[in-house]
Amino acid sequence: MLVEIARAVVAATLLCGTPTVTAATAKPPGLFPERWIDGTLAQEPEVQVQALDGDTFVIRQSIKTNFEAPFLYLLFGRDKALLVDTGAQGGQIRPVIDRLVAQWLSAKGRTRIPLVVAHSHSHGDHVAGDAAFRDRPDTTVIGLEAQDVARFFGIAKWPEELARFDLGGRSLTVIPTPGHQAAAIMIYDPRLNILLSGDTLYPGRLYVPVNFLAENRASVDRVAAFAASHPIRAVLGAHIEMTRTHGQDYPHEAPAHPDEHPLELPKRSIDELHKGLRAPLDTPDRPQVHDHFIIYPVAPRPN
Ligand SMILES: [Zn+2]
């Protein structure tokens, strides 16, 4: 079941629109039927799930459990299911996934489907729930090093080579995107024409260690080339850190996100990032601010 949240909804048209106030029951415009939990109410569920279709679920961990408030993705095919990320510290993701899988199986009149747990990248706010999946039956948790990801998806030439990962009637493309972090990937779903973009592109601060700028540029080159020949209805990242005011983000570790930017970015944001990365960005903490995201060079990191 989807989490129902009754409240006055302040909605705005998707990206660059004029804000309008709608009734509590009205749907916000955009990809998702409901407004995402954003920490602005005294109470909110620890996890919110919204379906894009009967086989595709987007999950948000409440900002009240962790300021990162990450988004996770669960995709079903005929033969297997794929979970992308397991959440940040403080999250309880496994029971939510078990419930969604049980509901999906019951809707299909089936008794089992293997689950693969992948990660948009290996930072703690995306892998903290892994331990809870290690003893789950019929489940494979992919390792956190780039070589683990490459081996699992059969990528001989990481990061240049793209991989296919077929869930059964749903053949995803895995695009290596090291830069923000060494094991980062994006995942393209040709059924819904969505690109799961992790922390490499989302409405927020796109942190890139200056010693990995070249890797990040090459990764975004790869994504832009892929996007040029594939339909993309929405780019779906792993956080929201922008408000609806152009170029305005929330303070780091903000406890709530009033007037939050939509999760989805349009396809043209890939081009905008691609062009933005051509500028010199070698000075840590001197960000390049765009309307819907901020390219944020940071001090060198080991990986
Ligand atoms: Zn993150």
Image (tube, rainbow, N blue to C red):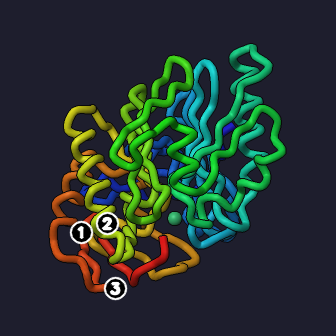
Name the residue: 39% across, 72% down. Answer: 207
Q: Which residue is mark 3?
A: 285
- The amino acid type of the residue labelled 3 equals Asp
Q: Is residue 21 visible?
A: no
- Label 3 environment density (alpha carbons within 10 Å; few <14, some 14–19, many ≥20): some
Checking the image for residue 181, the label placed there is: none
Give the secondary structure at mark 3: loop
Q: Which residue is mark 2?
A: 293
- Nearer the observer, 145 or 255: 145
Question: Disc 3 to disc 2, how far (Cα)?
Answer: 15 Å
Whether pointer 1 and pointer 3 mark residues with C-beta atoms closer than 8 Å, the reply is no
Name the residue: 25% across, 67% down. Answer: 291
- The amino acid type of the residue labelled 2 equals Phe
Q: Which residue is mark 1?
A: 290
The image quadrant that residue 163 belongs to is: top left
Q: Is residue 8 visible?
A: yes
Question: Disc 1 to disc 2, how far (Cα)?
Answer: 5 Å
* Horizontal and vertical percent position of residue 213: 30, 69
- Label 2 environment density (alpha carbons within 10 Å; few <14, some 14–19, many ≥20): many
Give the foreground label among 1 and 3. Answer: 3
Question: Which residue is outermost to the top?
Answer: 109
Give the foreground label among 3 and 2. Answer: 3
Give the secondary structure at mark 2: loop
- Nearer the observer, 273 or 24: 273
